[in-house]
Image: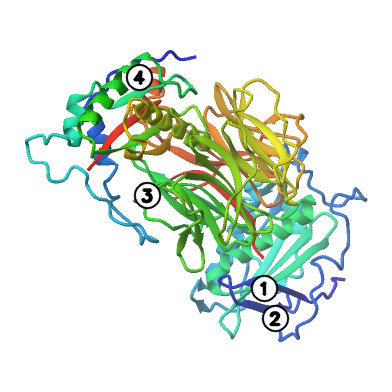
Amino acid sequence: MLPKTMLKTLLTVSGAALLAGTAAAQDVPAQQAAPAPAPQAGAANPQEPNAQQGGELVVDVVGGIAAPLGIAIPTMPTTEPVDTPAGRTDALGVQLSKIISTDLRNSGLFKPLEAGVKPVAFSEVTAPTFEYWTGAGASALVQGYVRATGDGTLTVGCYLYDVTSRNEIARQGFVVPPSDWRRAGHKCADMVYSKLTGEGPYFDSRVVYVSETGPKGRRIKRLAIMDQDGENHRFLTNGQAIALTPRLSPDQRSIVYMSYLNDRPAIYVYDLASGRQRLLVGNTDLTFAPRVSPDSRWVLFSMARSSNTDIYRVPLAGGTPQRLTTSTAIDTGGTYSPDGSRIAFESDRSGTQQLYVMNADGSQQQRISFGSGRYATPVWSPRGDLIAYTKIGGSFRIGVMSPAGGNEKLLTDGSQDEGPSWSPNGRVLMFFRSSGGGSGKADLWSVDLTGVNVRRVPTVLDGSDPAWGPLRP
Amino acid sequence: MAKVTTSILIATALLATAACSKKRPAVIPPAPSDTAPVDPNAGGNGAIVPGSRADFERSVTSNTVNFALDSYDIDGSARAILDSQAAWLAKYPNVTVSLEGHCDERGTREYNLALGDRRANSAKNYLAARGVAAGRISTISYGKERPLALGSDDQSLAQNRRAVTIVLN
């Protein structure tokens, strides 16, 4: 018997108002349901995702790469086709299942069925025909529905089933404004991914990056933002001034980045809600390499004064910079640990670029990279367990090491891979890969921690300097 | 690694690069607050005006000095070039210049911004030591964002490790 769980999910609308919605996913056809305290999705069927109890469906995030899990994601039916600002609900059902398929396939851990995916009737959403899906070769099944509600929102129900044991594993309902309809698909994919792998979700997230076009000698570099899958792309600057090294603040309100506006290269704070920007530090010194602290209160950055680059911090709201490093070398690329207590950075004080860690106040600076070659652009994993970097030794490659140094592992084998950025769950890195020679092209790529699942991230034009934002609320 | 061969760069190529970089893209979405660029070479009509950018580039050994890999040291050939620049700047004490620091593509983006700043300041400090008032010289680092030579061979990379003196009008 399926558990009768009331589901409720809150999604942020345009960064301001909160929209509370109730999706009584199991009530098919849906009836008006009173808001209820939201249980954890799947709480009625409690299980440790990684526990190896008898026959339970588990995806191993390391071994799973070699044998991705067969999963069926049929088109989500609708109660009745209704025109909405996002499109007709029956067309949205087709698109939503594609979004979920793409997210899961791109993780490298799932193999969505290409053939033999039959249409699912609305009444079938909570009563899957398990025999059919077993025959089709699916181990897991994601079903759902789309419904336009009277208040102009969309409700998307999302159900995950274990085909072999014929059990429901999890369900969630999402109420979204039409403009955010894709997010319901990402949220559903996140539920499936995290339930089956035990890892944190990451599909409902955005990426800020530098959109590039034009010949190598005078590339146009624009600030841009998009969803993690490349959709909902938007340019934020027009390309008259070079834009570099953006980072989304953890509260997702601001982007810090470097701009050559008025031929004065400096860090700007771009406000996403208003589209306005302001200079972070008001002086004539070169400021660059901005990173926002986990609490979104501080910006760690580099400043070149009298040809000496050190790491400073300044309140995101503005103020007087506080100097954290004092060596005569180039100290740059500062990045906070997830708890904000430590900073990793790069310095050429030993003669070549190497990685260092220090306390957030600049004390106890200590080198952590000792391999051959140079190390640059450290980024602390949101899980805290690893630091990703660019390894320079003839070629540029992306690698990870432990924050104490050691356990080095190179994940990519490109010739010019640079600037890693972590997914919100700390399992995937996005970076940019330049092609040598005269074209000057660069593209965004991602790689997971196994180093096996390397794939290109689609962008409107070329791309560099990706910065993966946090999971959206 | 790569040996630096300080090549005399063709002034017209530099002018073309500088001018092209001011071009607007064909399609531009609304800007946050960018202002329109000004053409520093506007107004010239045939004759080269003494004390102008064109006069500078005609008169000095080169407007560009080059650097060894990951270095910002001013070597012998760079000194000779900067000496010729200092001599010209001594004749026109009201002229201000911008020193652009550039790097090759074998460094990471942020590190190269710092390295380009060091190169621009190396050249600036040398000119200042030769009597050019430091207040007349501004610096700007382009890191590896504005390569001059477009190849990835050693010779191209060597050309891109440079500091360029631009006369501001």
Mark drawn on residue A29? 2
How did the renderer colour the structure? Answer: rainbow
Write the residue at 34% across / 26% down: B149
The three-letter amino acid code for the residue at tag 2 is Pro
Nearest the viewer among B48 and A305 is A305
The three-letter amino acid code for the residue at tag 4 is Ala
Counting labels gives 4
Q: Which residue matches tag 1?
A: A122
| Residue A133 visible here | no
- Locate residue A399 relative to residue B135 in the image: left or right: right
Callout 3 and callout 1 share a chain: yes
Tag nearer the camera, 3 or 2 = 3
- Locate residue A338 relative to residue B59 in the image: left or right: right
Please provide percent x and percent y for residue A85.
Answer: 48, 75
Write the residue at 35% across / 19% down: B78
| Residue A62 visible here | yes
Contact between marks 3 and 2 (CB within 8 A): the answer is no
Contact between marks 4 and 2 (CB within 8 A): the answer is no
Mark drawn on residue A241? 3
Q: Chain of mark 3?
A: A
Q: Earlier in the sequence, mark 3 or mark 2?
A: 2
The three-letter amino acid code for the residue at tag 3 is Ala
Q: Secondary structure at mark 2?
A: loop
Tag nearer the camera, 4 or 2 = 4
Tag nearer the camera, 3 or 1 = 3
Tag nearer the camera, 3 or 4 = 4
Q: Secondary structure at mark 4?
A: helix
Q: Which residue matches tag 4?
A: B78
Contact between marks 2 and 1 (CB within 8 A): the answer is yes
